[in-house]
Image (tube, grey):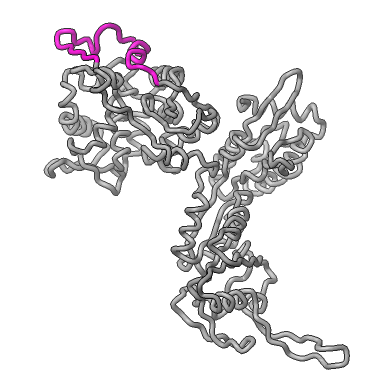
Amino acid sequence: MKVYISENDVKNSIDYFKNGGFEDDDSLGIYLMLKHLGISTENNVALDTKDPRLQDSLDLVAKITDNSEEYLYGSYMIPFCFATGEYYQKGTQFGHLLGRLRDTVKQKNNKIALYDMDLDSKPATLRLKTTYKDTLQSRYLLNNKISLKQLASWIFRFNEFEFDTLPSKEEFSRVVRKYALHYFHFTKQEQAWLYDDDLQFSLIEPSKSHISGSTIREVLGIKESIGGLNAKQEYIQLDPSDQAPLPSVPKRIVKQYSALIGDNPSKDTILNTLKLKRQIILTGVPGTGKSRYTQELSKDPFFKKSDTVQFHANYTYEEFIGGTSLENTSDSSPMKVVSKKGALLKIVQEAKEDPDNNYLLVIDEINRGNIAAILGETIIALDRNYTVDLSKPIEGISKLHLPNNLYLVGTMNTSDRNIAFLDLAIRRRFAFINLIPNYDFLSEKVHFNLSYSNKDYNFNLGAILKIINNRIYADLKDSSKLLGQSYLIPQPTQQGEYNWDSDLFQDQFNFVILPTLQEYEFQKNGITASVVGDSLSNGILDKDEFYRAFVNQFSELVR
């Protein structure tokens, strides 16, 4: 079924841009259009009027008519100009708007330089100046950030999203958010200054119908005419057969963005990367699901067999590669020297003897071991095109070569201090896949309902964890100190549901989350109170006092 952004959310977005505190100018809207085309400080884009993406981006950013109507003049208004009601090129006929874009960018760039332009090329090309960020912040954003919810609500006001059934607000907002980030090529770095990633806290309502152009113009305060151009006004109500299709997000993309994986790669993406590289390391802060991914990979039918080892400070070459040890042969016989294969040699031999099937070795917490000591001379075998002579024969094996049907997966916590050494030792021999906290799973699958002080609260734990992590990052500027989603995931019920009991949640907060935050006090004194508030930072044991403080701290994150 076709699902749209609700009329009310679009109206709210119009009000937001009317009062957003941005410079009343076309430049921010044009910048967003060029962002869609992929402009950056390194990548040139062409102002090619024949490029359909350019017209599509102009329509999405500024068109105030829907597909059932057509105006010859004045049917575009960039949202940052809603407060003044200034139209985009109101005296230019619809078919000539793109042709004027080059001149518009040139004129504005001469006043406030955002782009390096090559006007001699056909078509003209441009890319962002290295100083563009400071210019946008000071001259156009006015040191504000754009709400991603309000931007997406406006940009996709006419978009059709293809779902199987009417989605929940959480699922719909998740899809819209990811599509917006993809559409504008927004990066994580830009979140710090360009946009406010607020769709975790403030959701968009799905609807079975889209807002009309006439309603948009009414909210904008436009009455009988478009642009006040009565003498030139030409309005056509299009027959259904003449109407252009609405921009659509196909079911394939919707399904991809609906997955409860946060901003992480899917299991299929990880598996495909493993097939390509044969050796990967899953990194991330504690609690981001690295072990869950390795368990899923181990169960994948692509592998006939999987083994798991865990590195630690005392893990040895003899355990991983192999070596000799003294063993009793019987009660009456003396001890003798026995040669034994380690975990790697064992699975290497199995894989070599069974070339038609694939084998997997998982190395948990790979950076906790002494890599140089554990691998020894065999580290070069990770290059796959080398055969290594072992320092001593092990069960008659004197050489090591990793077969192509053996795959290696390591896991590593980015909060560990010895991560830099690991990077230097084996970085080029592995693909590294970083996992970040999955707020979507918490928001949709983990439930915490609380009855307190004659009120019922349904807390959005994904939003709460995101707030906590935002505060941690604001204080420490260190993403390796963030908390993973498992900090707020309880044990599942027999039915596979995740429901917090109020007593257990209080214990989890006081005795798991707080001690982790208190470890950060060595880096910045007072960070615990800064992140969760003065009251909660004290580890309140009284239940009523704890939930009074919790409600006061996170009351805005109730669904």
Q: Looking at the rendering, in which quadrant would you find the C terminus?
A: top right
- Residue 153 spot, x, y in % from top left: 42, 26
- Residue 337 spot, x, y in % from top left: 73, 90
Q: Looking at the rendering, in which quadrant would you find the N terminus?
A: top left
* In-front residue for pair 380/471: 380
* In-front residue for pair 273/132: 273
Q: Which residues are magenta?
A: 210-237
- Residue 259 spot, x, y in % from top left: 52, 42
Q: Residue at x 34, y 34 (%)?
A: 136
Q: Is residue 379 above or below residue 203?
A: below
| Main secondary structure along the magenta-highlighted residues | loop
Q: Is residue 523 above or below residue 462?
A: below
Q: Is residue 504 above or below residue 246?
A: below
Q: Is residue 105 above or below residue 354?
A: above
Is 438 colored magenta in this rendering?
A: no
Q: Residue at x 13, y 44 (%)?
A: 121
Give the farthest residue toward the bottom. Answer: 333
Is 63 placed left or right of 204 in the picture?
left
